[in-house]
Image (tube, rainbow, N blue to C red):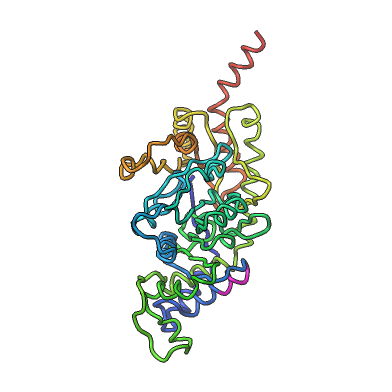
Amino acid sequence: MPFNKPFLSGRETDYITDAVRSGKISGNGLYTHKCHQFLTKKYHFKKVLLTTSCTDALEMAAILADIQPGDEVIVPSYTFVSTALAFIRQGAHVVFADSSQANPNLDIDKLESLITDRTKAIVPVHYAGIACDMDRLMALAYKYNLLIIEDAAQAINSFYKGKPLGSIGHMAAFSFHETKNIISGEGGMLVVNAERFCRRAEIIWEKGTNRSEFFRGEVNKYEWVDIGSSFLPSEVISAFLYAQLENIELIQNRRTALWNYYYQSLMPLALAGYVRLPDIPDYATNNAHMFYLICQNIEERSALIDALKENGILAVFHYLSLHKSGYYRSKHDGRELVYSDMYTNCLVRLPLFYELTFLEIDQIVAVINGVYQPRLHAEIVDHND
């Protein structure tokens, strides 16, 4: 049983064929525009630009934020390397924040102490599609004149107090990698919510030229006007993505049903204190991006992953704390990030994809219960004695 299996609606190849036959496949064409319109209308984003990856979207955000050498950017340690790398490439010093005890999102209670007069931006990661407390983050941004750049890689179709994630910060980056809910193989999206960044975002997206304005008839020629790169995807990628977006409600409903079945099935183990299940704050919705367990230690997690593997089930751990990485260890300020390290050692992700069945979840849960059954039996015997 795989950890992930990409969902296909059946229209992806139809739309790709249509894009190829149109004679315009280099990008910023019909299907790119269709995706932009769909996402802008559904989530009320101010401006949307598809990219070839979430990494590209983050790199665009770092350029737009005018990150300079010596600037500081606060990033959670428990995240994928791209969250930090985009800003390091601009010369920033990344200040790593710890996760909260309740879930892998950054600990906002400790955030203000990390802000200095060199801090330029905070990059909250909505882990597993579960929202960070955006009201508190935006209050800090207002108080200290900071930018909030949402890393919403896992957060499509998830909400904070009714607001779509990615629509609240000054900018946001999404992923459409094949492991995400909505996919294009590789792919991403930059969302710009602050008006002052909109025009420049489009220029950076088009290799530093005002080419998009030219094609809209807003200028009589296009030229090199800024820095930038080739961030936009081909129409082949956009056509694939559009077929996915058309089915977003179908996909989300199925994933949510599977997630809820996992949660109900594993609740007895959680109530017995053997594992922790995902925590979802009252202000957040759940887009069912992933289902994870928190084990008590790394040895227990390893035993659980091994037991599942022996039964043909692929479960995996997730991030390694970036502040302890080989690249950044010597640059970190030495603070212990206790919960980031705890999630590094104790979190395990279970298979979750559209074609997963409830029967297969029963099989997965049976293996997990089997790992803990000897302990449960021993405790019952000890209690009876």
Which region shows up in magenta? 37-42
Q: Residue furthest top?
A: 385
- Image coordinates of residue 311 in percent, x first then y, are 48, 36
In the image, 332: left or right of 298?
left
Question: What residue appears at the point 52 percent right and 67 percent down from the top-left corner?
Answer: 192
Against 104, residue 189 (above or below) is: below
Question: What residue appears at the point 54 percent right and 35 percent down from the top-left corner?
Answer: 294
Q: Is residue 313 magenta?
A: no
Against 234, residue 158 (above or below) is: above
Q: Is residue 40 magenta?
A: yes
- Image coordinates of residue 293 in percent, x first then y, are 55, 37
Tell me the quarter of the picture where residue 267 sits. Answer: top right
Examine the residues drawn in magenta and state their main secondary structure.
helix
- Image coordinates of residue 232 in percent, x first then y, are 41, 71
Considering depth in this image, is 335 or 161 the residue closer to the camera?
A: 335
Considering depth in this image, is 7 or 155 the residue closer to the camera?
A: 155
